[in-house]
Image (cartoon, rainbow, N blue to C red):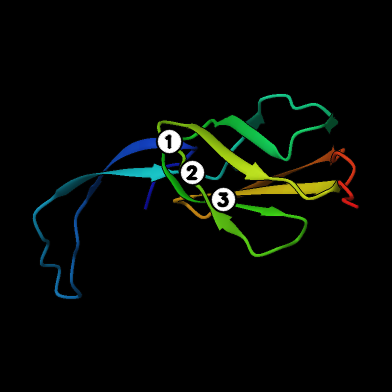
Amino acid sequence: TPNKAFTDGIHQVEATIMDNAGNASQNIKFNLLIDTLSPKITIKEIAAKTKSDKLDLSGAINKILIKSAIMTINHEKPKAFDVKNGFFNTSIILSKGSNTITILISDIAGNTSSVQMSIFYEAPPDTVYF
């Protein structure tokens, strides 16, 4: 039993197991990671309006050990993307009009965080041929 509650971070733990007869095991030492904090997502600023259907989206996550990084655009099928060394960069295709982008990050401890942003794609008028 620990003397006090563990705080977030890495703790060196030493344990001995004892049976009902009083026989003790050898001591074992190991590191224990306590992580109760949600990942912080920082997105590079994007314009509220664009005339391009392609959007390069980049940002940072304050944690290295990411379990999953998922993005949805306009509530369509979620798409996984890579986070390397706490950073990501991905390209997406926008639909005409308003687009809602949601990013959901989960770390290996199961903590989650999400951000949502909107961007309006002002598409060029359709070309009509006669």
Q: Position of residue 7 (x, y in %)?
A: 49, 38
Residue mark closest to the camera, 3 vs 2? 3
The residue tagged 2 is 35
47 on left or right of 58: right
Q: Which mark is residue 10?
A: none
Q: Which mark is residue 64?
A: 1
Element type at mark 2: loop
**Where 101 sits versus 47, above or below?**
below
Report the residue that reaches farthest toward the bottom.
Answer: 20
Q: Residues within 10 Å of mark 1 (few under 14, many from 20)?
A: some
- The CA span between labels 3 and 1 is 13 Å
Q: Residue at x 36, y 36 (%)?
A: 10
Q: Residues within 10 Å of mark 2 (few under 14, many from 20)?
A: some
Camera-side residue of 129 and 122:
129
110 on left or right of 126: left
The residue tagged 3 is 111
Q: Residue at x 51, y 48 (%)?
A: 81
Nearer-N-terminus badge (3/2): 2
> Are dots 3 and 2 in contact, CB under 8 Å?
yes
